[in-house]
Image: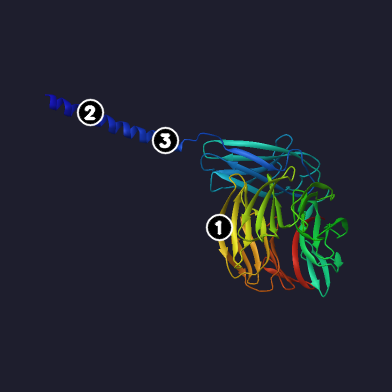
Amino acid sequence: MITKNSNFRFLVSGIQISFLTVMLLAFFSCQKEKDKSDPVIEIIRPVEGEIIRTNTFEVKFRVNDDIQLKYIRLALANDQFEPVNTPVFFYPKGKDTTINYMVSWDEGYGGNGEYKVQVLAEDGRNSKFKYRSFNADISVVGYAQLQYFSKRDQYWDLWGLDFNGFVSESLVTQSEEVIQLESGLLNGNLYTLTAFPSRLQARDGSDGRQLWYKEAAMPHTLFTHMFVKDNMLLLADASGTISMLNATTGSGLLTHHQQTDTIPQRVYFDEKYIYVANKVVSGGQYILSLHHIATASPYKRFVLPGKVHGIFQFLYKEATLLMENDAGDLLLHTFHNEDETFTAKGSFSGHVLRQVRSTDQGELLLVSDKGLGIIDVAAGNIQMVDESSEIQDALRHPMTNGLTYTNGSKIFRGSGSFQAFGEVKFLTYTFIGD
């Protein structure tokens, strides 16, 4: 009897354990699929109360959730929360996504007044709205004009292609060598760096007239690089100085003087830091210096495996660095500004780099002696688009994302091409009023 009772108790106990195991598995399975929170929305641009003066402007926002996002809807509304444009839908592939999008007013809207950016996030179970108020003052409707520098003999000419692709008259002719051309995009201005004498010039994109300029300071009178975003211009010189300027007025906002033997080669900033890629002359090292965005005061330095050719935004809180090591290989890394870690994404050999630009699609446009290639940063691979050795620059249209690039004296846009006067060196887009 004792044996039977023991076996019976063992059998019952076993049944109870099996039943409990099944129940626990079912419970945790249900818990895994349970939606514990609403989507979290952070609208980054426009900032609260910002005045928009262009027909097209940038909206940037981040959405994250504890489960897969189903879709995100972006729309504009008036001060009565009534829609004033056709909504745009996004279908992210993860739980955390950052989106940059160029919004255009629908016909009949964009006059003076208060408007709201509306972001709706849906995860299949819960939805969440968030609004950001801004003011619009649109006096004229504009379009993105392609502008470029071409070189003929010792002269540099600034030209523009209008909306229909016809050349406007030459805006500027100068003898100083151009080393960089950038656009303020929405503020309608162009910015150029020249070599000798080294000068930063701000020009009106519609007619080329000079708005303001800045000379490089002693002891090394040479500007090395600039970065323009959100009406702020970050400037570096060979004396080790970095300066943040108001891109419209040229007035100084922040300045920091680095060590005298530290030469900034590339600069960039995001919502948290100023990034400076330096060469240390005395030791021959390459370092990345981080500075607090609010004060430009130094925060931290990292030793890099090579010279930096570009620093760009990749994802929210992540930057892309394209470097070149002593063997001539191009190295692709990302840097996360919260955990302060670098991730190697890929390497490319046999390229003599001429230009590299970033787009809002997680890619780099790489121009080298091998031609034009598109680098997928996440995948770390490159796809060649045109293998001509005469390509000098490439970029995407800010609204249509169409690819534009140079090939000698030709400019290719979409399926068509345009014959320029002289060899085309630099391209950019800026918004011009009709």
Which residue is identified by label 3? Answer: 30
Which residue is identified by label 2? Answer: 12
Residue 384's quadrant in the figure?
bottom right
Residue 381 x %, y %:
55, 62
Q: Are marks 2 and 3 in contact (CB under 8 Å)?
A: no
Q: Which amino acid does label 3 sit on?
A: Cys
Between the C-alphas of marks 1 and 2, the distance is: 57 Å
Is disc 1 placed on a helix, strand or loop? strand
Residue 285's quadrant in the figure?
bottom right
Q: What residue type is labelled 1?
A: Lys
Circle nearer the viewer, 2 or 3: 2
Residue 112 x %, y %:
81, 41
Instruction: Name the foreground residue: 120 vs 159.
Output: 159
- Mark closest to the chain's N terminus, 1 or 3: 3
Mark 3 closeness class: few <14, some 14–19, many ≥20 residues within 10 Å: few
Q: Residue at x 62, y 43 (%)?
A: 62
The numbered disc on residue 86 is none
Is disc 2 placed on a helix, strand or loop? helix
- Mark closest to the chain's N terminus, 1 or 2: 2
Total numbered badges shown on the rendered structure: 3
Which residue is identified by label 1? Answer: 345
Between the C-alphas of marks 1 and 3, the distance is: 37 Å
- In the figure, is residue 166 to the left or right of 391? right
Mark 1 closeness class: few <14, some 14–19, many ≥20 residues within 10 Å: some
Q: Are marks 1 and 2 in contact (CB under 8 Å)?
A: no
- In the figure, is residue 268 to the left or right of 316? right
Mark 2 closeness class: few <14, some 14–19, many ≥20 residues within 10 Å: few
